[in-house]
């Protein structure tokens, strides 16, 4: 008996009236958002706004103080094997001799998240061959074959980031959580990496939640954005969220959003902007609460 065509498929991410405290500090509260499978969503906000904290909540590393959360239809932590996670940019010393392909292999039998993981393919010759084939497949997927055999410390920032994305993809995840993968890259490389993530994930049907400071490299690809500021969040399409009215209300002070002749967004005024900002964090008054769902 076949399943009905309208069978319910759990959302990739569901947060309902969620709040987080670390010690006595409330990071954010009453945040509700959802993200469908296969969607490309940007998580924006300044330093200290709680973007990385949200990713850690989704991984089960930080508990909610209130509210609820599910990932891929399961309790947080239960489905981590189906999540590809790229932490904030790692720095590789120029003398690091690990090859790029070795970095990708860590996604299978290393410790992507700082915790030992079981060998994904076991130790038999057949499974080791399958592992090698999968590593080669994702290296090709991110167009890194020309330099994957070189020491990672000798590669450019963009080349390293492609290999780290391959590492996050190697277990065929259903959801990718990427923490500032464009940080410290020049503008052309940011655009290249953003296009890569979009292309790979569209082809594989993988949902992407990408933390970013600048929304501009993502504008051609992003389905919606979530903006964190002052302990609150607003979510929706770019044209609804990145506006003067919405950001002014969210931050509790005047913010102006302009569109340059080349289509890039420029945010004028304090505090942190989602484009061309300087990593300053400010808090909105408690009454300036925008509660929004990404649907």
Image (cartoon, helix red, strand yellow):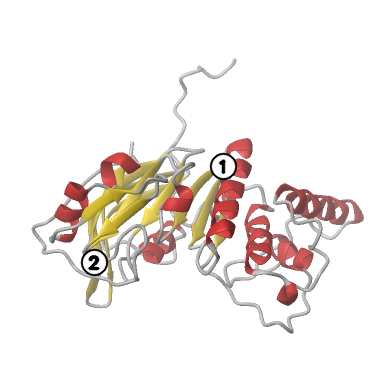
Residue nearest the viewer, comparing 211 with 77: 211
**Rendered-image quadrant of the C terminus:** top left
Residue nearest the viewer, comparing 43 with 52: 43
Q: What distance separates the C-alpha of mark 2 from that of mark 1?
A: 33 Å
Residue nearest the viewer, comparing 24 with 3: 24
Residue nearest the viewer, comparing 25 with 264: 264
| Rendering coords of residue 55 (x, y %) | 43, 60
Residue 132 placement: quadrant:
bottom right
* Position of residue 72 in the picture relative to residue 17 (left or right): right
| Rendering coords of residue 250 (x, y %) | 18, 55
Count of numbered labels shown in the rendering: 2
- Mark on residue 271? 2
- State the SS at label 1: loop
* Position of residue 55 in the picture relative to residue 22 (left or right): right
Q: Nearer the viewer, mark 2 or mark 1?
A: 2
Observer able to see residue 16 = no
Observer able to see residue 261 = yes
| Rendering coords of residue 134 (x, y %) | 78, 50
Q: Report which residue position mark 1 lands on.
A: 206
* Dot 2 alpha-carbon crowd within 10 angstroms: few under 14, some 14 to 19, many 20 or more: many
Residue 19 placement: quadrant:
bottom left
* Position of residue 89 in the picture relative to residue 129 (left or right): left
| Rendering coords of residue 221 (x, y %) | 49, 42
């Amino acid at each position: 008996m076949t399943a009905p065509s309208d069978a319910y498929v759990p959302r990739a991410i569901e947060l309902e009236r969620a709040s987080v405290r670390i010690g006595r500090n409330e990071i954010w509260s009453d945040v509700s958002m959802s993200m469908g499978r296969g969607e490309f969503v940007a998580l924006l906000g300044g330093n200290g706004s709680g973007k990385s904290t949200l990713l850690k909540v989704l991984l089960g590393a930080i508990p909610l103080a209130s509210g609820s959360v599910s990932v891929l239809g399961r309790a947080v932590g239960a489905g981590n094997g189906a999540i590809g996670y790229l932490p904030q940019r790692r720095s590789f010393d120029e003398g690091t001799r690990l090859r790029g392909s070795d970095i990708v292999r860590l996604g299978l039998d290393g410790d992507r998240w700082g915790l030992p993981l079981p060998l994904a393919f076991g130790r038999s010759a057949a499974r080791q061959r399958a592992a090698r084939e999968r590593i080669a497949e994702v290296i090709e997927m991110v167009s890194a074959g020309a330099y994957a055999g070189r020491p990672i410390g000798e590669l450019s920032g963009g080349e390293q980031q492609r290999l780290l994305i391959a590492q996050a993809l190697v277990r065929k995840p259903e959801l990718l959580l990427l923490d500032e993968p464009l940080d410290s890259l020049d503008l052309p490389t940011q655009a290249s990496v953003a296009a890569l993530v979009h292309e790979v994930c569209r082809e594989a049907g993988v949902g992407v939640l990408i933390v970013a400071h600048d929304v501009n490299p993502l504008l051609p690809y992003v389905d919606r954005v979530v903006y964190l500021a002052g302990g609150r969040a607003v979510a929706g399409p770019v044209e609804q969220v990145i506006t003067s009215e919405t950001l002014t209300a969210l931050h509790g002070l005047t913010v102006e959003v302009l569109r340059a002749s080349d289509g890039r967004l420029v945010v004028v005024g304090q505090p942190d902007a989602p484009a061309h900002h300087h990593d300053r964090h400010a808090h909105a008054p408690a009454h300036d609460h925008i509660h929004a769902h990404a649907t």
